Image (cartoon, rainbow, N blue to C red):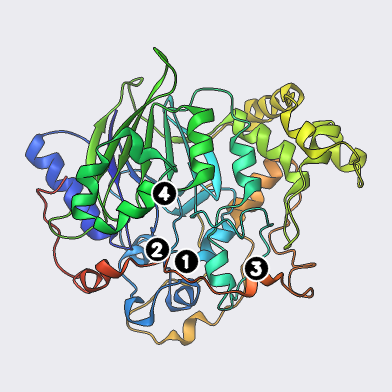
Amino acid sequence: MKIAVEGCMHGDLDKVYETIRYIENTRNIKIDLLICCGDFQAIRNEKDMESLNVPPKYKEMKSFWKYYSGQEVAPVPTIFIGGNHEASNYLWELYYGGWAAPNIYFLGFAGVVKFGNIRIGGLSGIYNARHYHLGHHERPPYNDNTIRSVYHVREYDVHKLMQVEEPIDIFLSHDWPLGITDYGNWKQLVRYKKHFEDEIQQGTLGSKPAAQLLEKLKPSYWFSAHLHCKFTALVQHEEGGQVTKFLALDKCLPGRKFLQIVDIESDPGPYEVQYDEEWLAITRKFNCVFPLTTRLGDFRCVYMTVCNSYYSRRISEPTTDVLTCRSTQLDMQDCRNWVKSRLENRGAKPCEFSQTVPPYNPSHSVSNTNFSGSPRNPQTLSFLELLDLPYVLDNVSGSRDSPAPASLTQRDDYSEDIPIEDEDELEDDSAEPDNENQ
């Protein structure tokens, strides 16, 4: 299976697909899958840009809307995760994953799917220690604080991924795992990214949760983006044991290393995106403790319930120490059997794509996109129906009425969004990509 891996998309789908076509034609090969490692910017219309956290001068429609509207169709199946520059209102509709456009699949805030027999997992967003232990309390329309915190990685999503036991072939994160530079040529990296050196020396460059997932999951490949540069590393997990090939790539700009073709051994095609049985069982098991307020996530009761009837048997005030609960091996067999039976009856193919808001129309004004809030996406409803779970994504109890913790009202004293050195380069996004750049 030939997979094109791309760094930060920043809405430039036309340019990336054009580059893929060029590679296919010049090398006489067929790309089976495109993977994007975040900052996808699935902007459907002008209203979505209100949920995109970038300075006003960088708010552009770009080209995703063409694929959402059906004007264009992705020429290669595409799987992506979220980063820190996203239409967060749209991605929240698809929290569990789903088709953002025909042939373009969002892995969700955390997720695992199969593409053929290749197992692909991912974690959307970037790490921020102040918000990591909180619930997903943000709802559109976002304010100056929640437009930033909405894309911060949460412990709940990481904890679910930590339950995965079966082998992962590919894992995606937007920011790099903490300490990954120890396994590659970091001295070469700092020669052209000098401002990384202090963080590398201090051991603070990267995401701690991503590092924990790397250590636990030990995927064959780990792809990232975010820092707008190419970096490779080989992680030997134990002597003579599993090796993870790490690759981070740049954003789509002329002369930048934003795309690379990876050849992975797999069963013969055709290939399609399918639900992953183990991940569905984990999702079903942990949905009872889905944290939706600014309170800390609490996983204790999930270890004290039976999957088939946890809503009726959930213990509201568990007394077992949370650390003991987290160290207990979670028996997923009941959930696996239940999910397996559902998939045998329904099949593992995700629900078809459907629009939930009008797409951008260059000939019309913004008056055709007055919808506010976050609609219930039919794909999400279908997913929850499959797992016999309630819809809670529009639950705002406790998140709007209660005062936010002080940590949520403080502004960051650093820029996590657009590296200063890249600000001028972003203004050149309209230029044609260098098709030789892979």
Q: Quadrant of residue 163?
A: top right
First in sequence: mark 1 or mark 2? 2
Look at the numbered disc 4 and give the secondary structure of its residue: helix
Image coords of residue 372 (percent x, y): 60, 78
The Cα atoms of the two marked residues, 3 and 1, are separated by: 23 Å
Please tell me whether mark 4 or mark 1 is closer to you in this view: 4
Name the mark on residue 87: 1
Label 3 environment density (alpha carbons within 10 Å; few <14, some 14–19, many ≥20): few
Look at the numbered disc 2 and give the secondary structure of its residue: loop
The amino acid on which the numbered mark 1 sits, given as a three-letter code, is Ala
- Per the image, the residue denoted by label 3 is 407
Classify the position of the N terminus by image quarter. Answer: top left
On screen, residue 334 above or below 201: above
First in sequence: mark 4 or mark 2? 2
Residue 245 vs residue 192, the one in the foreground: 192
Please tell me whether mark 3 or mark 1 is closer to you in this view: 3
Look at the numbered disc 3 and give the secondary structure of its residue: helix
Label 2 environment density (alpha carbons within 10 Å; few <14, some 14–19, many ≥20): many
The Cα atoms of the two marked residues, 4 and 1, are separated by: 33 Å
Label 1 environment density (alpha carbons within 10 Å; few <14, some 14–19, many ≥20): many
On screen, residue 219 above or below 317: above
Name the mark on residue 41: 2
Disc 4 to disc 2: CB gap under 8 Å:
no
Q: Residue furthest top?
A: 240
Q: How many marks?
A: 4
The amino acid on which the numbered mark 4 sits, given as a three-letter code, is Gln
On screen, residue 33 above or below 56: above
The Cα atoms of the two marked residues, 4 and 2, are separated by: 32 Å
First in sequence: mark 4 or mark 3? 4
Disc 3 to disc 1: CB gap under 8 Å:
no
Q: Is residue 225 left or right of residue 212?
A: left
Label 4 environment density (alpha carbons within 10 Å; few <14, some 14–19, many ≥20): few
